[in-house]
Amino acid sequence: MLDEHILFIDGEAMVIDKPSGLPVDPPRDGSISLENHLQSLSFGFKRWPSAVHRLDRDTSGCLLLARNPKAHKRFALAFEEGRVEKTYLAILDGIPATSEGVVDLPLAKTSTRESGWRMIGDPRGKPATTAWRQIAEVKGRALVEFKPATGRTHQIRVHAASGIGVPILGDPVYGKGGGVTLLHALALVVPREGKEPITARAPLPERFAALGFTDPS
C-alpha cells in the first residue's frame, strides 16, 4: 500500500515514494495506477489528494500530491515557474566522455505510425535545460545526478541519450531497452510562501543496489 511510502505530509501536501511500474495516470488498458490508491492516501480528508506533476511509469521516487485544490494550484505554479528543486539519479548504459555539464537542448514531440511518439532535440522545440554530474562508476556504467531546470516530457531521458551521448540503462525508447528504465526521483524541494518548504528524499531503490550502486548521501 502507498500509505507506507509517505516521505512528507502536512495539511496541504504529501510526497510519496512512487514505486517503479506504477503509472501516475490511468493506462488505456485499465490496469492499476496511482488513482487506485488515492482513497487510501486521504487520511481523513473528504477530498482525495491529486498529483501535481508526473513521473514516467518506470521512474520511482518523489511525487508531490496536493491535498486540496488551492494547494494544487500553488504547487503547479511553482513547477511551471521553475521554482521547484528536483534531483534525479540514473544509471547510464556506459560512461560519459566528461564528468559533468549542462545540457541545453530544446525538445519537441514527433510521431510515426511505425514506432509511435517520442521526444527529440529540436531547436524549434520548448526550452529544456538539465545540469548533470557523474557520481560513481561500476562495471562500465555510470551513476549520474540530474538537476533539471525545466520539466519537459522525457527530458532527462532525451538529454542523457542525445545531450550526454549515453542513454539511461533499460530505456526502451531512447536506449537499448531490455528491462526497467533506471531513473529515480531522488529529492524534491518545493518553496512555500510563509511556510517551511516541502522537502523530501526517496531512498535509492533495490534495483540500483543490485547493480552495485549505493546512495550517495
Image (cartoon, grey):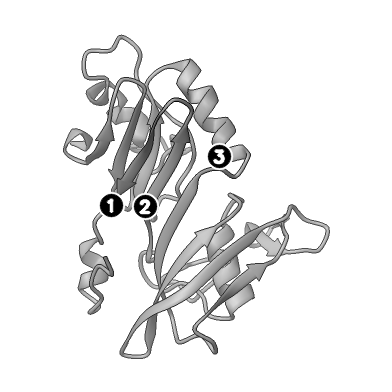
Q: Give the residue at x 69% y 63%.
A: 120
Query: Which amino acid type corresponds to the residue marked 1 in the rendered image?
Result: Ala
Q: CA distance from mark 2 to mark 1?
A: 6 Å
- In this view, which residue lies farthest toward the top? 46
**Residue 166 visible at all:** yes
Is tag 1's residue or tag 3's residue first in the polypeptide sequence?
3
Q: Quadrant of the C terminus?
A: bottom left
Q: Position of residue 68 (x, y in %)?
A: 41, 17
Q: CA distance from mark 2 to mark 3?
A: 14 Å
Query: Is 72 on the left-hand or right-hand side of 49?
Result: right
Q: Disc 2, disc 1: CB below 8 Å?
A: yes
Query: Which amino acid type corresponds to the residue marked 2 in the rendered image?
Result: Ala
Q: Give the residue at x 68% y 66%.
A: 104
Q: Indicate the secondary structure of the residue bearing disc 1.
A: loop
- Please name the residue that numbered disc 1 is placed on: 202
Query: Which amino acid type corresponds to the residue marked 3 in the rendered image?
Result: Phe
Is tag 2's residue or tag 3's residue first in the polypeptide sequence?
3
**Frontmost residue, 108 versus 113:** 108
- Please name the residue that numbered disc 3 is placed on: 79
- Please name the residue that numbered disc 2 is placed on: 187
Q: Position of residue 23 (x, y in %)?
A: 40, 43
Q: Indicate the secondary structure of the residue bearing disc 2.
A: strand
Q: How many C-alpha atoms fall within 10 Å of the one at disc 2: few (<14), some, or many (≥20)?
A: many
**Residue 25 visible at all:** no
Quarter residue 40 falls in: top left
**Frontmost residue, 39 versus 49:** 49
Q: Give the residue at x 36% y 29%.
A: 35
